Amino acid sequence: MTDPVRWGVLGASKFALQQMAPAIHAARGAEFAAIATSSADKAKPFQDFCPALQVYESYDALLSDPTIDAVYIPLPNHLHVEWTKRAAEAGKHVLCEKPIAMAADDIDELIALRDRTGLLLTEAYMIVHHPQWQRARQMVADGAIGKLLHVDAVFSYDNSADTANIRNHPETGGGALPDIGVYTIGSTRYVTGQEPKVVSANITWENEVDVISRVAAQFQGFSYTCVVSMRMFPRQEITFHGDGGVLKVTAPFNPNVYSQAELHLHQPELSERVERFPGVNHYVLQVENFCNTVRTGAEYPWSLEDAKGTQAVIDRAFASARP
């Protein structure tokens, strides 16, 4: 029997508490073993569902624990590259929250570090582990909508009242594109396997972060538009429009929270086929796939190169929109 991958978490973030730590705890082949936080109050909710959890008062202390195999990093965006590097240099496999870097070129040193150490270093891009997205990619590739001509996507929420939120501050890597543009852009790249030739953006700024970003791009054979916002009523949807049908992905990024994950395939003569994926937890699947790669060497479905490709599009969007 293969030993479980023992996980540590750097920081007691709200997202780690609500989603990723429970997913690590629930995943097959994983053991939630340690958390690093200087606050006993913040550690307690984690200990409530995992009483044997080891609590370290510093990130370095956790990284020094030789029994920890892998770490999950949910720190503010501007710290991702630094702590991914420090964890890898300590011999740990790393699952780091998105975006793993604030600029595409910064990912090159992580790729070199991964290749040198042989460790699994990757971005926590959970949607590619969900069967909804795997099926969407297959359907588009198989010609279910004919020739793909256009993709449109939207992802929005409103955190305007939460002025202390790290997403509202430039010094912590805030903004709508870094936070959720990775999904509207990366999912299109994942489904089509293509990179855009032209990228442009129109951006509404507040406090030097993008709060509404409208991105347009031209891929080989199809056009693309998306809107991501931290100032609009919550909505998420992505549509792949071909000359022989339309594929709509509902709850594409937060299934079981926003709504149920479904695929709606509209074809000629007003026919519609709906495929549903109730109760699937893509965070658990992400951890299980990560552990399987660590233990068996199986291919992992989202590489640092994949993350770099999405970040490169975001970089180009920002460059086109700034004065």
Image (cartoon, rainbow, N blue to C red):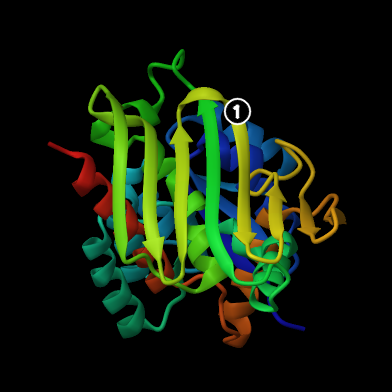
Q: In which quadrant of the rendered image does the N terminus lie?
A: bottom right
Q: What x and y, as percent, mark residue 59?
A: 38, 49
* Residue with the most extreme bottom position: 297
Q: In terms of image quadrants, where is residue 293? A: bottom right
Q: Identify the residue at the far top of this view.
A: 161
- The residue positioned farthest toward the left in the image shown: 323
The answer, for residue 74, to whether it is visible in the render is no
What residue is drawn where x is 61% and y is 64%?
128
Q: Position of residue 197 (x, y in %)?
A: 31, 66
Q: Is residue 178 left or right of residue 149?
A: left
Mark 1 sits on what residue? Answer: 234
Q: Quadrant of the C terminus?
A: top left
Residue at (22% x, 40% y) in the render: 321
| 89 shown above or below 80 | below
Question: In the depicted view, which residue is nearer to us: 86 or 139?
Answer: 139
> Would you identify the image quadrant in which residue 258 lies?
top right
Q: Position of residue 39 (x, y in %)?
A: 47, 30
Q: Is residue 144 visible?
A: yes
> Quadrant of residue 28 in the image?
bottom right
Residue 164 lies left or right of residue 9; in this view the side is left
Secondary structure state at the residue bearing disc 1: strand
Q: Residue at x 48, y 65 (%)?
A: 189
Q: Look at label 1 and name its amino acid.
A: Pro
Compared with residue 93, is residue 64 higher up or lower down, i.e. above or below? above
Q: Nearer the viewer, residue 187 or 107?
A: 187
Image x and y of residue 276, in percent = 85, 54
What residue do we see at 25% from left, 22% from top? 207
Neighbours of disc 1 within 10 Å: few (<14), some (14-19), many (20+): few
Q: Looking at this view, is 121 or 319 the one in front?
A: 319
Q: Is residue 125 above or below residue 160?
A: below
Total number of numbered labels? 1
